[in-house]
């Protein structure tokens, strides 16, 4: 199988490259100059054009791992977030429509499309009520994927990823906890600690993608990608600092950051019907992440 991974230099993209390269012919695409990788497309960050990419090779699968992934930045720079998370998806799908219409397309969406859910666990039929520009833009990208399936027959699938983490991730909760532990300043954290997330370790996430590649229906719909367990922030923070810096004290400031949901837990029965079962608990995942952090500090 010939697979194109867009955003191949990013966190999720690089792990997808490593995994799928073991059994498939993988081509990479990103905005970072690379003079070593033989099957690599360099895209202009300011004016991306995917027509040459899609017309030069015949791909079986295109996995779009590119885009912005920051709620705070989407509030600060909404136009940039729109360009990266909506316009780029449209450009990619339109290039597929013109040059490679049999190519299946996987779009990385986000649980942010749900906003603050009205019930837990959240299944795919839950109403979409995003509370940030990032969540709104991910919702728009999903609608574009549905549009291209219904109007042009392009087989698409959107993955509503919950809280992904693992070695190589230099942003979001665990990276923030690590950076704050490096400072002599008091450690203050957003929220109350009673907020919850559904954390999925990167190796589980990649196996989920593989399950979808093999058995997904690609009918323009969406599918939750998560561990399927609600974990409270106070618990993972306590575990993280116990393992990384037991001498550090911290406090929650009691204020919720704008755009952040309160509680998340995913219903992953649809993903499990494709043969996926997560294996990396939060405890194991945090230990692996801290081992990776140790390599940065050595």
Image (cartoon, grey):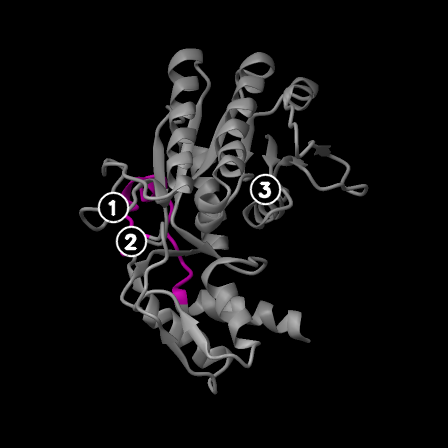
Find the distance from the CA under tag 3 to the CA under tag 2.
29 Å
Overall secondary structure of the magenta stretch?
Answer: loop
Q: Is residue 47 above or below residue 26?
A: above
What residue lies at 52% left-to-right and 27% top-to-bottom? 87
Labels 3 and 2: the sequence-earlier one: 3
What residue lies at 48% left-to-right and 69% top-to-bottom? 177
Front-most of residues 82 and 59: 82
**Residue 136: percent from left, percent from top:** 37, 36
Residue stretch in magenta:
261-282
Give the side of residue 190 with respect to residue 107, left or right.
left
Which mark lies nearer to you, 3 or 2? 2
- Judged from this view, the residue extending furthest toward the front is 76
Tell me whether the residue at label 1 lies in contact with that at label 2, contact meaning CB atoms closer than 8 angstroms: yes
Q: Which mark is residue 20?
A: 3
Tell me whether the residue at label 3 lies in contact with that at label 2, contact meaning CB atoms closer than 8 angstroms: no
> What is the secondary structure assignment of the residue under circle 2?
loop
- Judged from this view, the residue extending furthest toward the bottom is 247
Labels 1 and 3: the sequence-earlier one: 3
**Residue 65: percent from left, percent from top:** 54, 40
Which of the 4 image quadrants contains residue 51?
top right
**Residue 83: percent from left, percent from top:** 53, 32
Q: Which mark is residue 264?
A: 2
Disc 2 packing (10 Å; few <14; some 14–19; many ≥20) = many
Q: Which mark is residue 122?
A: 1
Residue 272 within the segment the image draws in magenta: yes
Find the distance from the CA under tag 1 to the CA under tag 2.
7 Å
Front-most of residues 279 and 14: 14
Disc 3 packing (10 Å; few <14; some 14–19; many ≥20) = some
Locate the C terminus and report the quarter of the image it occupies. bottom right
């Amino acid at each position: 199988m010939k697979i194109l991974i867009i955003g191949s230099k990013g966190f999720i993209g690089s792990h997808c490259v490593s995994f799928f390269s073991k059994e498939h012919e993988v081509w990479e695409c990103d905005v970072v100059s690379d003079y070593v990788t033989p099957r690599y497309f360099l895209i202009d960050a300011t004016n991306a054009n995917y027509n040459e990419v899609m017309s030069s090779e015949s791909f079986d699968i295109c996995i779009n791992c590119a885009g912005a992934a920051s709620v705070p930045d989407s509030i600060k720079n909404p136009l940039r977030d729109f360009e990266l998370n909506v316009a780029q998806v449209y450009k990619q799908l339109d290039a597929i429509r013109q040059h490679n219409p049999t190519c299946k397309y996987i779009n990385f969406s986000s649980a942010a499309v749900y906003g603050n859910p009205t019930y837990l666990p959240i299944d795919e039929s839950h109403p979409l009520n995003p509370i940030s520009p990032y969540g709104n833009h991910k919702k728009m990208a999903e609608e574009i994927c549905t549009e291209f399936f219904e109007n042009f027959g392009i087989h698409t699938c959107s993955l509503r990823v919950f809280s992904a983490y693992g070695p190589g991730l230099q942003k979001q909760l665990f990276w923030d906890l690590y950076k704050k532990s490096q400072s002599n300043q008091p450690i203050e954290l957003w929220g109350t600690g009673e907020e919850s997330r559904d954390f999925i370790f990167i190796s589980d996430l990649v196996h989920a993608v593989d399950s979808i590649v093999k058995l997904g229906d690609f009918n323009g719909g969406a599918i939750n990608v998560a561990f399927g367990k609600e974990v409270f922030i106070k618990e993972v923070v306590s575990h993280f600092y116990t393992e990384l810096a037991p001498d550090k004290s911290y406090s929650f400031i009691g204020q919720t950051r704008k755009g952040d949901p309160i509680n998340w837990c995913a219903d992953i029965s649809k993903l499990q019907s494709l043969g996926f079962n997560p294996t990396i608990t939060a405890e194991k995942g945090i230990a692996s992440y801290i081992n990776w952090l140790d390599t940065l500090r050595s």
